[in-house]
Amino acid sequence: MINETVKYIQKKIKDYKPQIGIILGSGLGDFANDFEPVQTISYADIPGFEKSTVIGHKGQLVFTKIKNKNTVIMQGRYHFYEGYNISKIVYPTKVMRKLGVEHLIITNAAGSVNKDYKAGDLMLIKDHINLMGVNPLVGENDSTLGDRFPDMSEVYKKDLIEMAEKKAKEIGLTVHKGVYAAMSGPSYETPAEINMLRVMGADAVGMSTVPEALVANYCGMDVLGISCITNSAAGVHPSRLSHIEVVETANKVKGMFKELLLKVIEEI
């Protein structure tokens, strides 16, 4: 099926070969609108792809040049809580690799577990904890994509993290470096679960990113993960949590997020 998907996309984009892939999280989809597309393809039209059902996720691939780099942007992603099999969640990541993507930038909206983080902060992901209860590599292995037992000691490339941190300083932006914990959702975590995550060493929590990062690492892509801290997790502050708040906070910080992303892409 992947070969069929790749052939369909290649017919649309012709000789355009993306080097960099970007997955845009909740409230961050506007980044793709700032560039003239070479081609835009709706997920609904791509064989093997599914519709994105979450508010704020347009559900399309945008092929464009950013800082003279051939780029493909996922304007919206799939989540496990939408009811899709985990293999569907990571299918676009595998397709991007087959199209030629070597560097994958994964973004998300996340809740702060670390009490020093506040809404509007950005966090570079240095590692993750998979608590989704599934692993996207379970099943028959495709040796054309990667080894059956991939090493996970550096899923998020240290040189990319260091470069992103340097670029953030150049634009006067303070970023955190932390551990991202992935839960299945769609319910937000309980205060007890947040306490558990803090004890385990997590700094932020969300419902995405880990499946794509895991598969990208398996496929040999260099991964950079960026979390936009959109809210304090349950128990950190007394306020109730809502997806509307997540999207609104992401919209407020998208300016500095875009500026950092442009600097990073230019340097890759």
Image (cartoon, helix red, strand yellow):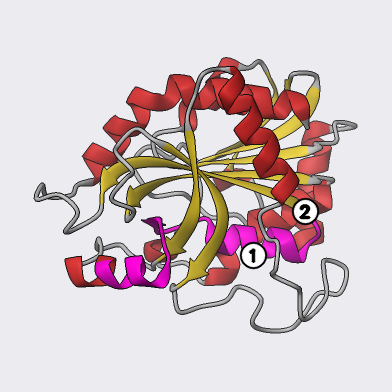
Query: In the picture shown, does residue 222 fall above or below 262?
Result: below
Residue 234, position as x, y percentages in the image: 19, 58
Query: Looking at this view, is 189 or 18 the one in front?
Result: 189
The image quarter containing residue 184 is bottom left
> Magenta segment, which residues?
195-221
Q: Which element type, helix, strand or loop, lies under badge 1? A: helix
Q: Which element type, helix, strand or loop, lies under badge 2? A: loop
Residue 97, position as x, y percentages in the image: 78, 52
The image quarter containing residue 124 is top right
Query: In the picture shown, does residue 192 fall above or below 171?
Result: below
Return the mark for residue 214. 1
**In the rendered image, which residue does mark 2 sit on?**
221
- In three-dimensional space, the C-alpha distance between marks 2 and 1, rounded to whole angstroms, equals 10 Å
Query: In the picture shown, does residue 8 fall above or below 79?
Result: above
Residue located at (77% from left, 35% from top): 12
Apparent side of residue 183 relative to residue 258 in the rendered image (left or right): left
Residue located at (32% from left, 50% from top): 111
Amino acid type shown at disc 2? Met
Mark 1 Cα shell of 10 Å, populated few (<14), some (14-19), many (≥20): many
Q: Earlier in the sequence, mark 2 or mark 1?
A: 1
Query: Looking at this view, is 171 or 25 the one in front?
Result: 171
Apparent side of residue 15 relative to residue 101 in the rendered image (left or right): right
Amino acid type shown at disc 1? Leu
Query: In what quadrant of the picture does the N terminus appear?
Result: bottom right
Instruction: Please tell me whether residue 209 belongs to the stretch shown in magenta.
Output: yes
Mark 2 Cα shell of 10 Å, populated few (<14), some (14-19), many (≥20): many
- Looking at the image, the residue that sits furthest to the bottom is 139
Return the mark for residue 186. none
Residue located at (25% from left, 54% from top): 233
Residue located at (38% from left, 25% from top): 253
Query: Looking at this view, is 59 or 175 the one in front?
Result: 175
Apparent side of residue 150 relative to residue 166 in the rendered image (left or right): right
